[in-house]
Amino acid sequence: MSYDVSCVIPRWGRTFKNVMQKLAVFTEEKTEIERVIALVERGKESASEDPKAVKEILDQANCPYVSIAPDRKRAERYYRIGFLGMNLNIQGILLRLEGDEPHNGSSLIKLDEVDLTVVGLDELLAMNQHYLEEPEKVRKWGHYNYNINKDTDLRIAGSANLTAYNKVAGKEITDFVGFFLIAHRSLSDPPLNLDHFRKRRTPVYVKGRYEGLVHELLPGLNTFPVENVEDAVVAEKGSAGIEIIQTGSTVQQKGLVVYGTPLFLSESLYVADYHRYLKNQKLQELLEILQPQGYFEAERISHYVDWFTALEINLGNAWINKPAIDELFCSLEEMRNGLRPYRLQTRRWMPSDDYKIEEAEGLVGRTLEQIRDLYQKSK
């Protein structure tokens, strides 16, 4: 069976489930998609170091859309059932959907082997920093395309607007996460200070795949790669770590604190081969159906306020030197560094330096005012 568009998504996890649920709205294969989601979720419970045990469960399921793969992000490297792939008809577009490691989607785009992927900014930065002219300035996904200075067709089309239920917010909100500095409570007084860490050679734990990224954004730190950052920080009271945080529940449970502004904000993104996009009418149609969200769109802003507020409530006094809600979203300096609007119709999906700065400043000003207003109403 031929296909019009190829897309790679994570083979399991929150992003996998959310993408599948979103696609189910646009296709008649909804029942099969729901079956695959259930099998993959069951695969987490039945994960085992013995591939034969997992194979027995897979055989019983008798589903051609799933397979066995090792979970390399876990120290035990369990084998588990994950998404293999399937063909979907999305409103007349034949989509070849495949499961893989989260970071492999963008790698396959670079290798010219896939049209589209869904990936977080964290994975994108970890794998593709070398394409950026000033990687230290890319702290929001809206900066990314503007900063590309080498020959690559990999571009962010926009936010995938994948949502998950947040207990504190009491509703579905976008899957925002922050890449935060965390530490043991004993380090919160006197206030945490990166220069202090550098001078004292404080151990800073980080997941191995992010170590290069941390060195780029925070040079001079005494980093150590580990499997579980939070557990490593708990085990060594004088240490710190850098970890992705969505709700803050685990940090609270383990008696840790979160410090300051995150190194960057991440969420699930549609990332595409821009050259293929220009040549492939079906890929253009698919993205129109999926509707990638721009950085400054109203719904995304509302979800951002809900996420920040929920994180603030959840962390309480465990969030040291908390930034202002509007400051974290965008600043005039970031706007001048390329955090400006672009649409799928914009050339290379990149805001131009000819963009009227006065208009951009006005947009940022109105956006920050809207954020402050929504934040006050949530109190």
Image (cartoon, rainbow, N blue to C red):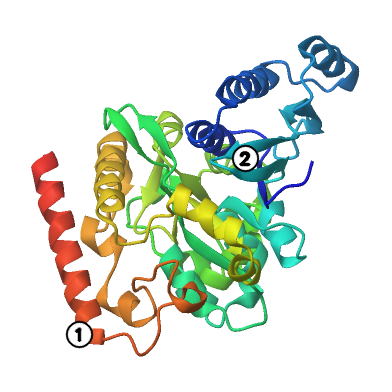
On the image, the x and y values in percent for residue 8 come to: 67, 47
Could you tell which of marks 1 and 2 lies nearer the N-terminus? 2
On the image, the x and y values in percent for residue 257 come to: 38, 44
Under tag 2, what secondary structure? loop
Q: What mark, if any, has residue 358 been given in the picture?
A: 1
Give yes or no for contact between labels 1 and 2 (Cβ–Cβ under 8 Å): no
Under tag 1, what secondary structure? helix
Q: What mark, if any, has residue 228 been given in the picture?
A: 2
Camera-side residue of 161 and 173: 161
On the image, the x and y values in percent for residue 200 come to: 52, 65
Q: On the rendered structure, is 176 left or right of 306?
A: right
Label 1 vs label 2: CA separation?
46 Å
> Foreground mark, 1 or 2?
1
Disc 2 residue crowd, few under 14, some 14–19, many 20+, Cα 10 Å:
some
Identity of the residue drawn at 63% across and 61% down: 126
241 up-or-down from 347: above or below? above
228 up-or-down from 261: above or below? above
- In this view of the protein, can residue 240 be seen by the observer? no
Kindly identify the amino acid type of the residue bearing the numbered disc 1.
Answer: Glu
Identity of the residue drawn at 79% across and 20% down: 48
Kindly identify the amino acid type of the residue bearing the numbered disc 2.
Answer: Asn
306 up-or-down from 110: above or below? above
Q: Residue 214 appears in which quarter of the rendering?
A: bottom right
The quarter of the picture where the N terminus appears is top right
* Residue at the farthest top position: 60
